Structure formats: structure tokens, C-alpha cells
Image (tube, rainbow, N blue to C red):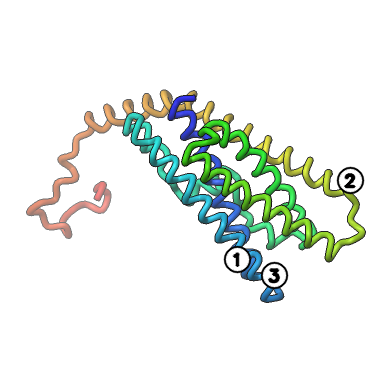
Amino acid sequence: MDNLKQIKILYETAHAEYGSALEMLAACKKSDTPSLALGYFLHSKDEYNHTATFFSLISKRAKKIDSTKAKLFRFLPISIIKKGYVSKNGFLIDYLKIKDFIAFVYTNELLAKNSFSKILKMVGYQTNDGIKIKQIMNDELRHHGMAKNHFLKYYPALQPWQLRIYKLRETIKNKTRIFHIKNMQFLEIVFRPIYFFVSYIIGRIILLLNLLEFNRCGKNLMSIPPKSVL
């Protein structure tokens, strides 16, 4: 797989990790107990570190491609919302029941670990990058285990089939998000020539305009007719 394709995969994953970090930090701020707040804080810290790792991998590969293409993969915080990793309506902890929020963590950490398995294969198992990915995978499994322990402690009646439903629901959401991203990329390809054409036409029209009307140098502005453009 060439560097550009690897960058695209790592770029999406970095956004997912950053979105997760923000979700965990929001949960930390709304926690009722110090122990739970600490758990969310440490989880958030891990996700921020994962984000930094992925962007370091992107930076290394971006040096090997054309600079014009590399600039397209700069990080913009607003992309977290545009890509659907954080809802524009707020953080999950703001409108989910705590059980559903923990279920989200439980399932998404496991899904993330599975996704990182593919990335690990992409970068190489025995490479320095592979070692970094393995560490991230260990962190995700630890987060998954912590969420599972929370379920066993506070929701002992929760059945395994319910957790499978949670996982299925999050899997569908992730696939829908990926479809949305690919659809937006396709629309960008379709509409970009139209955008350039319209911009060109507007530019030509501006060149034909008489701009002398806007030259007010040395003129008494009080004497300009009220119906003037200025």
C-alpha cells in the first residue's frame, strides 16, 4: 500500500481517537465520584496520546508525497464534527444514560482494537510503527476491560445478548459514518469542477466592471449622491 493510502487511513483513525478523547474528557467533567472521574481522565489521556501517535505516523509519510497533497491532511478541530466523531448536538454523556454510555465505550474500544489489527498489518508487525500500534491496541483492550468490569459491578443482570446488540448497533453506526465520508469525497470530486467554473465566470465579470466609481481619493464624501454605490 502506497504512502497516500496509508495516510488516508491513519488520518481518519486519528480523528476517531481525538473524538474519543473529547468524549472521555466530557464524561470526566460530569462524573459524580472522584474514582470514576479519574478513570475517564486517564482514558482521555490515553486517547490524546493515541492521536499524537497517529499524527506522527502521518507526518513521517507526508514527507514522502507531494506537498500539495500533504497539506490536505492538516488537522482541523472542526473536522471532528464534520466527520461525525463528535455530534454537533453535544457529547454523548450529555444525552445518553450512563449504562448506554458505558456500553458505547465497551463496544467501541473492542471495535477500535479490531480496526487497529488491520493498521498493524499495514505498517508491519515488527516495525517501530508496528510496536506503537501494538501499544495502542493494548490500551484499547484495557479500556474495554474496564468498561466490562463496570458492567459486571453495577449491572450484574445485564445479559450477553444485550451487549451483542450494543456492539451491532455501534458497528452499523461506524459503517454508516464511513459511507457518509466516502459519499462526501465523491460529491467533492463531482462539484469541484463546477466550483472552479463558477469562480472563473465571476472573476471575468469582475474584470469587466468599472471600478472608478469606488475611487474616492481626494473627494469630499459629503458631496457624494445618496444613491451612490458607496
Task: Give the numbered dot on residue 41.
Answer: 1
Relative to 91, is 107 on the left or the right? right
Q: Residues within 10 Å of mark 1 (few under 14, many from 20)?
A: some
Q: Which comes before the other along the chain, label 1 or label 3?
A: 3
Residue that label 2 marks: 161
Residue 155 image offset from top left, x and y in percent = 86, 62
Residue that label 3 marks: 36
Q: Residue at x 44, y 48 (%)?
A: 76
Q: With respect to residue 88, does 208 lie above or below? A: above
Q: Quadrant of residue 64?
A: top left
Element class at badge 2: helix
Q: What amino acid is labelled 3 in the image? A: Leu
Q: Residue at x 49, y 34 (%)?
A: 8
Q: Which comes before the other along the chain, label 3 or label 2?
A: 3
Q: Are marks 1 and 3 in contact (CB under 8 Å)?
A: no
Q: Residues within 10 Å of mark 3 (few under 14, many from 20)?
A: few
